Image: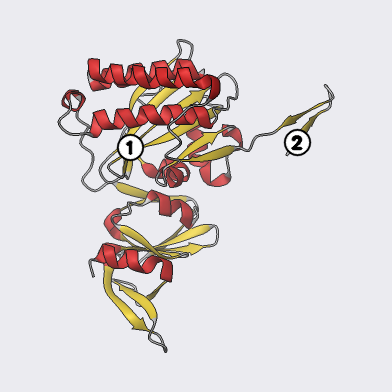
Amino acid sequence: MLLDASHSGTQVLARPSFELFDLPLPPDCRDIQDARCDEWVFQTARMLLAEPCDQAITGILELTGLAAGADRAWMFEYDATLLRFRNTHEWSRETVTSHVTDLQDTPVTMIAWLQQFLSANQAVMINDVSALPRPARDLQAEMLRQNDKSVLCIPVFFEDRLRACVGFDATRIHTHWDDAITSQLYRCANLIALARYGSNTPAQQNRQPVSRLSADPLIYIRTFGRVRGVTMAEIVCLRSARDYTTLFLSDGSSMTDLRPLSIWAGMLPPGHFHRIHRTTIVNLHHVAELNRHAGSSGDRWEVSLRILDETQSVSRPYRQELRSKLGV
């Protein structure tokens, strides 16, 4: 879409509020960015080998943040359930406020819109925080509180599991970090993941332990005028209700959350929950029976869940993974 800047007689290409980059990205950097890319990776490796892991990560954030023209660079980590996260490292310019102590033991529901992309190993370039879509309003409120205008978020995976996220904030002017910058930061994040989460490495031995979080972290359901916290075990089933999601709970009650099912799909731990239909996600621990010969023709798959009387249909694309997760 083109915006007419009539006062100057020129036209400016308007960027969308956010863009997605699929990862892993190509490891090479092109043209004039080659030297800078090599320098980022070299300095990241050098710091991780020479310094304690936490000290090295902060130094890497400063190095890459300055090189990318960011105002703030940060890292947050998830707990083992992927239901809570906490800020662990941050660098910011002298004139920019620090927020590393703000988000500690925070429910992932606050970043649910972002989480759906991070869990799919996608980088998110938020060009204009103020123009984020409605489902992102909780995240938007936090970013605006931090005076963010543009934000780049890179998921950090290790051994096929989401462990953390690193990124840049622009607080002075709107900034666009393209796929070349994203690729460079992603390569640095891979080295950080190897040092921080790999076993038997000097950096791992220097790592500060993650604070112990609640054994039963709460997932927050936001409905009309009310917020309710429930444990993962209390959620039996989730069904799409157009732009909203209906959650069926183990006490027999149900609540309609003001976020679409796609956001919940990216937020819930895949080891405990499985999508069985485009409109339905079930808690595997509540699956009482799997019938692979239902219906008049005997080729329909259905699952029975504790608490719920009616069965849930299983679509073909989700059947084999469901069998694998159930071990049958």
In this picture, residue 193 sits left or right of residue 204: right
Task: Determine the residue located farthest toward the bottom in the rendered image.
Answer: 296
- Please, what is the three-letter code of the amino acid marked with disc 1? Phe
Number of callouts = 2
Q: Which residue is mark 2?
A: 2
- Please, what is the three-letter code of the amino acid marked with disc 2? Leu
Residue 85 circle label: 1
Residue 128 location (% of width, % of height)? 59, 32
Q: Residues within 10 Å of mark 2 (few under 14, many from 20)?
A: few
Going from the N terminus, do you reach mark 1 or mark 2 first? Answer: 2
Label 2: element kind: strand
Q: Give the position of the C terminus as an image quadrant.
A: bottom left
Q: Nearer the viewer, residue 102 or 267?
A: 267
User: Do the residues bearing badges 1 and 2 touch, measured as CB atoms within 8 Å?
Assistant: no
Q: Nearer the viewer, residue 66 or 104?
A: 66
| Quarter-of-image position of residue 108 | top left
Q: Residues within 10 Å of mark 1 (few under 14, many from 20)?
A: many
Please tell me whether residue 62 is drawn above or below residue 211 in the rendered image. above
In this picture, residue 168 sits left or right of residue 194: right
Which mark is in front, 1 or 2?
A: 2
In this picture, residue 312 sits left or right of residue 55: right
Q: Give the position of the N terminus as an image quadrant.
A: top right
- Residue 91 in sight in this render: no
Which residue is painted at 65% across and 34% down in the image?
Answer: 15
Residue 294 location (% of width, % of height)? 36, 83
Which residue is painted at 54% across and 34% down in the image?
Answer: 126
Could you give the CA–CA distance between mark 1 and mark 2, rounded to whole angstroms? 39 Å
Residue 110 location (% of width, % of height)? 42, 41
